[in-house]
Amino acid sequence: MTHHDGVALIPVTGTGRGRQEAVPVGGRGVEGLRISLLGPVRIRCGDQEVAAGSPQRQAVLAVLALRARQVVTGDELARLVWGESAPPSVGAVVRNHISRLRAAIGGDGVLVSRAGGYALELADLDLDAAEFDLLADAAARHRGRGEAAAAVGRYREALALWTGTALSGVPGPNAERQRERLTGRRLTVLESCLELELGLGGHARVVEELTALCAEYPLRESLRGLLMTALYRTGRQAEALEAFADARRVLADELGVQPGPDLRRLQRRILCADPELAPLSTAAGPPATGTAHEPLPRAGAMAVPAQLPAGAGDFTGRGAEVELIVNGLTGDIPSGAAVVAVSGLVGVGKTTLAVRAARTVRAAFADGQLYADLHGTRSEAGEPADVLAGFLRALGVPAQAIPEQSVERAELYRAVLAGRRILVVLDGARDEEQVRPLLPGGSSCAVLVTSRARLTGLGPSLAVHLGRLAPQEAVEFLSAVAGRSRIAAEPAAADDIAAACGCLPLALRIAATRIVARPAWSIAAFAARLRDENRRLSELRVGDLAVETELRLACQQLPAELADAFLRLAVLPDCSIPAAAAVLGLAEDSVGEILEGLVDAGMLDPPVHGRYRFHDVVRLFARAGA
């Protein structure tokens, strides 16, 4: 840098033409004088380094140098250097330090007394902190003109002026404030420089520097973001995600907070292999370590989950419902994901139907299918946070990159699904609250939910309420499970079994399985066993599968008021609101809400001509419980 009167000529690198940029500077200064504050305090006069004196004398010099050409009074010097711990004779101490600094610096008119105070007549280029600002400002101008390489050159020149911690070892409140200010300025400049170097393809060269900086300043999220970007661009996606996980741990431990939105957004872009994160060119060459890395993954190369359970080989009937669900999942939805909610009584075949429909449309969801049993009727229902973690792992998110907080998992889940064609099957939901965090955010995905309750609060694009099988379908189902020849040999008895099971798929499957397990039984003999209502529920049990068990679990999920009404209303084969009010001893308005609550819970059939009806098997269970 060449210094003429009031102007510094800075060579402009990266232009190939040897151009120099004129930068205005302040002060005329003294030839050969140089004061350094960006590290230990140093004074140079020509080729000689002069002792800067005691820490307090260095503190006085720092105040005057950083306020070059400004008058600082003795009282102000005392306050800035000593604060409230100034000695009684502080005025004399200040004058002594000024005298010794004048002797050390030399030259007339450098450290002058003026207007009741002192001023250091120092040119900008005679102070490293001022030169740092000049170079950083020049770099910013280059950057504004799109001259990235020239800007990097100026930034690196500025950063090279630092020889350690600013004002190292200098005491006093002013020194502490200035140290913090100068360090913050250096970090801002360094981040700007590193960002430009990343843009110029230098990702491999800056990884080591960024790693050291993140260790030195672990709470600075902007540095973490630059490190994550550099690692990702060198093909080290897993390490980039680990850098985010480490940032999250440190922020939680030190401050009790989560990473900011910018860092979380970058993590999601890395997980989704955002093409815009890829380097603009390969000019940077191989990684600095000399190790060849695998090519960066692209969105199409991400994990493609295939979690759908196997379909039932004996699936029977439900053709209209399957077609309805298929159209609901694959049709055009104006906004958001298509949500199809299937509800119905316990054992009505919701899961089997959902799996059948999902497997029918899976070719339309080429990016994968997710499935989760939410165990909504169990006492330990699936927690959305746990389901989200499982989904994220299935989508290829490394375990260390999965956030701890449920809300952040949901954000990441929606980000990973964005733009991908994925089907999400949520089986056995308890209520809307359990389902909402698991819904994708975009229209490229579709969701199929099953629940005993009607999940009207989700605002589904299609709601399907599943009823019992038609009598003919029920007999066909018995045939598919127990064997066609055996059922066909006793058609009347088969009709009786279907009727005793109330055409409920779960009861039919148990009955058919028992028939298969007892080849010596006649169909008529088993129909006779089921005819006895007092023993029917005990007959509809095989292994760990029992209608009574499933109904008991469903009943346990009911609020106390609904559970009580459920048991007491079982004395009626069907009922109107007035009849139910008489049995329950409540006002008709209240009873209407109770009956609809039982319908929503899948424990009572929807009303037909104003009359509510229990499923036959459900009524037997309720009567036994009453």
Image (tube, rainbow, N blue to C red):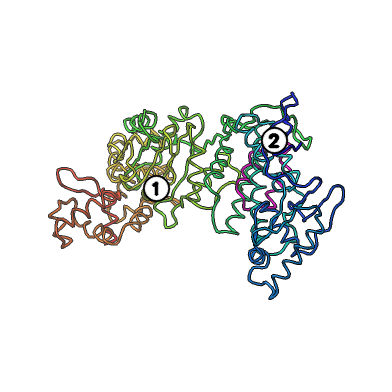
Tell me the amino acid under the disc marked 1: Ala
Where are the magenta residues, as a range?
A: 202-230
Quickly name the residue at label 2. 152
Quickly name the residue at label 1. 429
**Residue 120 numbered mark, or none:** none
Q: Nearer the viewer, mark 2 or mark 1?
A: 2
Name the residue at 75% across, 31% down: 286
Mark 1 element type: loop
Residues at marks 2 and 1, CA–CA distance in whole angstroms: 56 Å
Name the residue at 31% across, 34% down: 473
In the rendered image, the quadrant that contains the C terminus is bottom left
Residue 159 % position (x, y)? 72, 44
Residue 399 appears in the picture as rendered: no
Mark 2 element type: helix
Dominant secondary structure (helix, strand or loop) of the stretch shown in magenta? helix
Name the residue at 42% across, 45% down: 518
What crowding class fits label 2: few (fewer than 14 Cα within 10 Å), some (14-19), or many (20 or more)? many
Residue 441 % position (x, y)? 43, 39
Work out whether residue 351 or residue 169 is closer to the camera in this orientation and state it. Answer: 169
What crowding class fits label 1: few (fewer than 14 Cα within 10 Å), some (14-19), or many (20 or more)? many
> In the picture provided, is 326 more to the left or to the right than 262?
left
